[in-house]
Image (tube, helix red, strand yellow):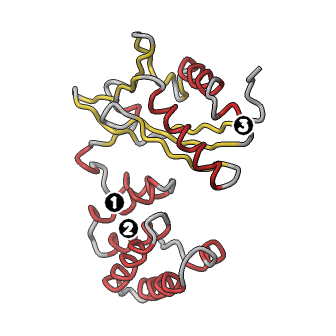
Amino acid sequence: MINLKFFFLFLMQICFSQTNEVNQLLLNGEKAFLENNFSLAKEIYTKAVDVDQKNKDFWFNLGTTELKLGENDNACEYFYQAYLLNDGEALKLIKENCPNFRNGSIMSINDVEEKPKFIYGKKEYPLVIGNSLNPKYGSILMSRLKFSSIMSKYKGQVFVQFQINNSNGLDVQIVRVSGSQKEAERIKKEILSIFKNLVTYVSAKNKGVNVDLWERWSQTFNFLMLPYN
């Protein structure tokens, strides 16, 4: 049985960051859903995601409502938006309800014929060995961070998630940066530049066609401990 992510479970989280309008929309959506008025719930949750597209619970609830309406394809698209915002449960529901999501253009790394790679110094390396990032990639990354004039002055922590897309590129999400807002924006910009320009990325392939991957890799960097000397 698939349930909503109920409003009262995250009331304290959103009450300081969302408007009264959104709070009321969520309460109304929950009420409509529990009364099996899924068409009304869909209308309400659609308004909620229009107001705040960065809240994974809004997308998840909209997807759950679409499932109740028998609109699996729509539901999985909304679950995908929740997944992009780090909702692991949403990915499970995509695989259960839309096993051929987007015509199989997104695959698990263990199912593709060619895993992602990177090119550095005119030599090609696998990006992943086993279930972990290639230590060679990690070494190149740490070296670049070490010699960044911006990062060498930063004393804090950064949490990053990234994945290889089907365009021979890297999608990077800076999940958390410590420090003031002004400093955090500068650090985010530098981290994104370093990751994207570090090496040449090569997409995973299946049947000769580039594909996106479900998998993401996470890295936490503590710049208080980087060996700059």
Residue located beneath label 3 in the image: 222
- Disc 2 and disc 1: Cα gap in Å? 6 Å
SS class, disc 2: helix
The amino acid at mark 2 is Gly
Let me know if residue 71 appears in the view: yes
The amino acid at mark 3 is Asn
Foreground: 193 or 73?
193
Q: Position of residue 195 (x, y in %)?
A: 50, 32
Q: Position of residue 185 (x, y in %)?
A: 58, 49
SS class, disc 3: strand
Q: Quadrant of residue 35?
A: bottom left
**What quarter of the picture does the C terminus occupy?**
top right
Marks 2 and 1: CB-CB under 8 Å? Answer: yes
Q: Residues within 10 Å of mark 3 (few under 14, many from 20)?
A: some
Residue 120 tag number: none
Residue located beneath label 1 in the image: 76
N-term mark: 3 or 2: 2
Q: On the picture, is 80 further left or further right than 149?
A: left
Foreground: 172 or 206?
172
Q: Position of residue 123 (x, y in %)?
A: 41, 10
Residue located beneath label 2 in the image: 63
SS class, disc 1: helix
Q: Is residue 103 above or below residue 21?
A: above
Q: On the picture, is 226 further left or further right than 83?
A: right
Q: What residue sits 29% from the left and 51% below the top?
A: 101
Marks 3 and 2: CB-CB under 8 Å? Answer: no
**What quarter of the picture does the N terminus occupy?**
bottom left
- Disc 3 and disc 1: Cα gap in Å? 36 Å
